[in-house]
Image: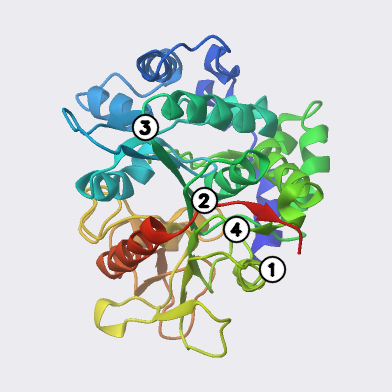
């Protein structure tokens, strides 16, 4: 029902499309001739500066830095160099992977947080971006990282998690995978975006899943049907390819049961079929229930913190995040923007009853702000530490037929 409501929004977009909803030159794939990580970092920053429409204020540098790829390097380190490449999700920017990046850097990793094509610039750039552009970008940046480190780990959130998985299964050599809210399946209603995106060639209103104020400087609030359709195509590509094989690369997964963006049940079933050594999963849900071997339950209902449940956007961000955290300056209320403007204003003003997943209201939680941080972030890092210790003793990852 929640997704059906989103499609109703299509018919009230007239007059709301502005410059940020048109593609910029930054929508193009990355050049095939990127010679170094430094060149890649410069290219992503150039695209942000060229395309964004909100760089006139005092926060210009913060916006440019947060939306550009970033590197955290272990300067002067000798011996074995471990690196991790982090990939953000759909409509996101590198800023949303910064908390994980800092955590890995503190653990002795060289870290690169990449920027996917069409992201970090303006929502209109996702009118032309294809999933193949994302796949190719991950492959390019992986190759740049492999020149600098001895062992490479891949980590990703949502669509970025699926891109990391696809890369690990397509080409051997990844030491371990860390997937946060992976987009292994989306709803049937979301798959309707493909025909709507085609209709968008003739009528702009059909090109957009939703148009929002875009008040979040690190994540698109407006989203194209084409972008969601490309995620569906990416999932189908993964299922037809080596995704049918059993992954033997060490695997860590974190997912939330109440997620309305991706199907976490599909993630649970996929994880249960794996024979990785080691493999760990954290599952955030209101009740423990029956979970596959290797899955650790963590409570998602925390009344003392007014947290009614976890959201898709919760797993990879720390409570201390200055923008999305418990005391952050951004409130995720876009689910009310068209459906209930009064609730949207109250939610933005901090009058919400609970934090949780959007469209999950109850009599006790009539206004729900979407949860944008993980209250168990430190506990998750402790589990990641244990996982990394196990990986050190594990053999080289490989793929085998089931």
- Tag 1 or tag 2, which sits nearer the N-term? 1
Q: CA distance from mark 2 to mark 1?
A: 45 Å
- The residue to which callout 3 is attached is 149
Tags 3 and 1 touching, CB below 8 Å: no
| Rendered-image quadrant of the C terminus | bottom right
Q: Position of residue 271 (x, y in %)?
A: 61, 68
- The residue to which callout 2 is attached is 396
For this view, does 34 lie left or right of residue 193? Answer: left
Q: Residues within 10 Å of mark 2 (few under 14, many from 20)?
A: some
Tags 2 and 3 touching, CB below 8 Å: no
Q: CA distance from mark 4 to mark 3?
A: 21 Å
Q: CA distance from mark 4 to mark 2?
A: 9 Å
Q: Quadrant of residue 44?
A: top left
Q: In the depicted view, which residue is nearer to us: 165 or 329?
A: 165
Q: Position of residue 222 (x, y in %)?
A: 54, 39
| Rendered-image quadrant of the N terminus | bottom right
Q: Residues within 10 Å of mark 4 (few under 14, many from 20)?
A: many
Numbered badge on residue 1 = 1
Q: Is residue 17 in sight in this rendering?
A: no
Where disc 4 sits, the SS reads loop
Numbered badge on residue 243 = none
Q: Residue at x 56, y 84 (%)?
A: 291
Residue 398 versus residue 229 in the image, above or below: below
Residue 247 versus residue 290 in the image, above or below: above
Where disc 1 sits, the SS reads loop
Where disc 2 sits, the SS reads loop
Q: Quadrant of residue 210?
A: top right
- The residue to which callout 4 is attached is 248
Q: Residues within 10 Å of mark 1 (few under 14, many from 20)?
A: few
Q: CA distance from mark 2 to mark 3?
A: 16 Å
Q: CA distance from mark 3 to mark 1?
A: 47 Å
């Amino acid at each position: 029902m929640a997704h059906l409501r989103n499609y109703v929004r299509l018919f009230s977009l007239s007059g709301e499309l502005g410059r940020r909803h048109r593609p910029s030159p930054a929508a193009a794939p990355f050049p095939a001739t990127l010679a170094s990580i430094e060149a890649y970092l410069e290219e992503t920053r150039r695209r942000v500066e060229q395309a964004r429409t909100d760089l006139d204020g005092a926060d210009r540098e913060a916006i440019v830095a947060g939306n550009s790829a970033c590197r955290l390097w272990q300067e002067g380190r000798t011996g074995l160099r471990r690196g991790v490449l982090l990939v953000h999700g759909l409509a996101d920017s590198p800023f949303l992977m910064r908390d994980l990046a800092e955590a890995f850097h503190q653990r002795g990793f060289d870290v690169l947080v990449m920027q996917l094509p069409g992201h970090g610039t303006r929502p209109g750039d996702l009118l032309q971006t294809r999933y193949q552009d994302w796949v190719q970008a991950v492959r390019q940046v992986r190759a740049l990282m492999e020149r600098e480190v001895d062992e490479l780990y891949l980590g990703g959130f949502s669509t970025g998690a699926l891109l990391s998985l696809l890369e690990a299964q397509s080409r051997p050599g990844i030491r371990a995978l860390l997937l946060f809210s992976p987009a292994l399946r989306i709803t049937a209603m979301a798959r309707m975006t493909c025909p709507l995106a085609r209709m968008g060639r003739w009528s702009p209103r059909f090109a957009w899943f939703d148009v929002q104020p875009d008040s979040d400087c690190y994540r698109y609030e407006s989203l194209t049907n084409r972008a969601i359709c490309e995620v569906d195509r990416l999932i189908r590509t993964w299922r037809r390819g080596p995704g049918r094989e059993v992954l033997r690369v060490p695997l860590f997964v974190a997912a939330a049961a109440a997620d309305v963006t991706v199907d976490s049940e599909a993630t649970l079933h996929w994880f249960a079929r794996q024979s990785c050594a080691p493999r760990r999963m954290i599952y955030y849900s209101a009740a423990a229930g029956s979970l596959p071997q290797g899955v650790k339950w963590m409570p998602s209902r925390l009344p003392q913190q007014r947290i009614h449940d976890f959201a898709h956007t919760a797993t990879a961000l720390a409570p201390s995040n200055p923008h999305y955290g418990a005391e952050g300056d951004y409130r995720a209320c876009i689910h009310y923007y068209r459906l209930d403007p009064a609730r949207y204003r109250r939610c933005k003003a901090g009058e919400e009853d609970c934090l949780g997943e959007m469209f999950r209201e109850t009599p006790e939680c009539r206004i729900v702000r979407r949860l944008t941080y993980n209250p168990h972030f430190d506990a998750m890092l402790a589990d990641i530490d244990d996982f990394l210790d196990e990986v050190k003793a594990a053999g080289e990852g490989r793929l085998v037929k089931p």
